[in-house]
Image (spheres, rainbow, N blue to C red):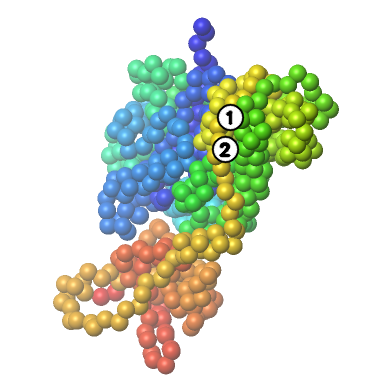
Amino acid sequence: MSEKKKFYITTAIAYTSRKPHIGNAYDIVLADMIARYKKMQGYDVFLMTGSDEHGQKIEEYAKNSGVTPKEYVDKVSSEIKAVWDSLDTSYDKFIRTTDDYHEKTIQRIFKKLYEQGDIYKGTYNGKYCVPCESFFTASQLVDGKCPDCGREVIDAKEEAYFLKLSKYQERLEKFYEENPDFIQPASRRNEMINNFIKPGLADLCVSRSTFKWGIPVDFDPDHVVYVWIDALSNYITGVGFDCQNNSEQFNKLWPADLHVIGKDIVRFHTIYWPIILMALGLPLPKQVLGHPWVLVGEDKMSKSKGNVIYADYLSKKFSADAVRYYLLSEIPFTQDGTITYESFITKFNSDLANTLGNLVNRSIAMTNKYFDGTVTKPTELNELDKDLIECCNDSIKKYNELMNIYHNAEACDKIITLAKRCNKYIDETAPWLLAKDEANKERLNAVLYNLLECIRNIAVMFTPIMPSSSASILKQLCTDNSSMSFGVLDSYTVTAPTPLFARIDTEKMLKEIEEETAVKEPAQNVVTLNQISIDDFAKIELKTAKIVDCEPIKKAKKLLKLTLNDGTNTPRIVASGIAKWYKPEDLIGKTVIVVSNLKPAVLCGVESNGMILAADCGNDDVRVIFADGIPEGSKVR
């Protein structure tokens, strides 16, 4: 027996700044679907996912939370795993970039590249986006803002090590020419060539010296290894690469067959990562799939916008399979998809409850009612039967073609179209009328067999997409036959039907969700103030900060969202209940006093990191205390 062909697939590792939302979860669901499908085709599959745990942003979050960075990432990494598990994903390994073996190998990789002249020491002077942890030249900015996330950038100057991207530009261009399918969809390939490669690759900053939460450069401890070499290299460290004696597993699995990532990090995986591998003398991954985003309505999901939907909440509410089906059927191959609670429920009712669930339930119920649960393969077929069988076989053929090129939304559509055709076939053949005449018993047997055989094929096709529901259908059909072809079984003996998806009352469910997800503002308790000591007062950190941006918060009439420059490199977000007395344009450019060490709190979807000082002047008159003219970051004592 020949050895199975390997298929090594990875997701982008999730950043441990916050618990992942439904958009972040698309990576793992898509990769898991591909992994399951490849297993069905007989591949020896290895799926790796994980968490990216270093960086300035995490250092800041940990400080604001009053914990060490390691304590912070331990918590968030556990949340990531819990969300992945809630979606019934079957990854083979979960790597953390704080794993000891990973950190040691990264130090060896960095040193190797430095010693062979691919990394050199210099000074960075340019623009930096804190949320993206990315450096940009002025020409790369869009309207003066970060080209990736659209946020404000800050001026940055620091000593750093750089990777010589320019040295490998011609070699990368040649690789693109020789491997036209390396980046999928093709539109992403065009973006990389036109926006980054043709203008010329600037050398890449690969160390930082202004924060400490990272893997130390062992020969220069003032520096930590920056995210690109640290995070991207997980794809090789996680399977046993170590610069010297690579593991048997690494030799078997590398190069990766597919990296599944979001479209916003295609540049890192198709320019930086290939060049790192070239410098290490390793083969490049075979393909990178840059999938679209999952939007809420027209907006990208973010906590600051208060529009976050969490995958584990949906999974608990509706089932993991329902969430998987929505994501895999609603996100097109090249364009962003959308999700709202209402659209989720609508699709659940239409496709899963009405079309699939109803088909399975009534077909099995009729088999039990009319034949005591057993039907046999018919010897004669009429034109209706032939049309149904042709639809089934055509659906299987197109499904496989689409799944092999990762067009999962279209593949889902083919399965549901077959289920709809089966429901139409029931209406056309009217089994309940055939059952009234014993002379039609053979014809009725044929109708029910044809339905059950189509349902079996539907269940097999849905296996990578909705594994639990597919297993339930096959269990009700009393078979584990996974052949995708019509007519492979001689008979069926079914169990009692088990409902798959109960129809949801949309209005009732939306009201329930609104109550469960509403952010409750803290009660304004009246307390008697006691005297405090000077030591107590010293615990409060007051700073001046300039308001650089201000906007209303949706669904919160009292609150304004303030973006403050408090003299650090990180913008500070504060939600303040002053909307009744101030308009955003009245505040932008003003300097205020902020309590900067206040414990963060989420108000109407916005995480507020501090509180500005204002005076209650009586008669419903509140006035912000301004400190114009005082430099940002000045301590108030």
Front residue of 601 and 55: 601
Residue visible at 32% across and 53% down in the picture: 62
Residue at 54% x, 68% y: name it: 554
Q: Quadrant of residue 495?
A: top right
Quarter of the image holding residue 530?
Answer: bottom left
Residue 322's label in the rendered image is: none
Where's residue 194, x and y in %?
A: 66, 39
User: Under tag 1, what secondary structure?
Assistant: loop
- Reading the image, the residue beneath label 2 is 497
Foreground residue among 572 and 376: 376
- Residue 399 point in image, percent of width and height: 68, 30
Q: Quadrant of residue 377?
A: top right
Q: Is residue 54 above or below residue 630?
A: above
Residue that protrudes farthest toward the top in the picture: 1
**10 Å crowding of disc 2: few (<14), some (14-19), many (20+):** many
Element marked by disc 2: loop
Residue 155 in the image: state x and y as whole percent.
46, 55
Q: For residue 140, say whether it is visible.
A: no
User: 310 above or below 290?
Assistant: below
Q: Position of residue 612 (x, y in %)?
A: 38, 74
Marks 1,2: beta carbons within 8 A? yes
Query: Which residue is farthest front?
Result: 438
Residue at image mark 1: 494
What distance separates the C-alpha of mark 1 from that of mark 2?
8 Å
Question: Which residue does the image show at 47% across and 73% down from the upper left?
Answer: 559
Q: Amino acid at mark 2?
A: Pro
Instruction: Tell me: residue 594, above or below residue 116.
Output: below
- Identify the amino acid type marked 1: Val
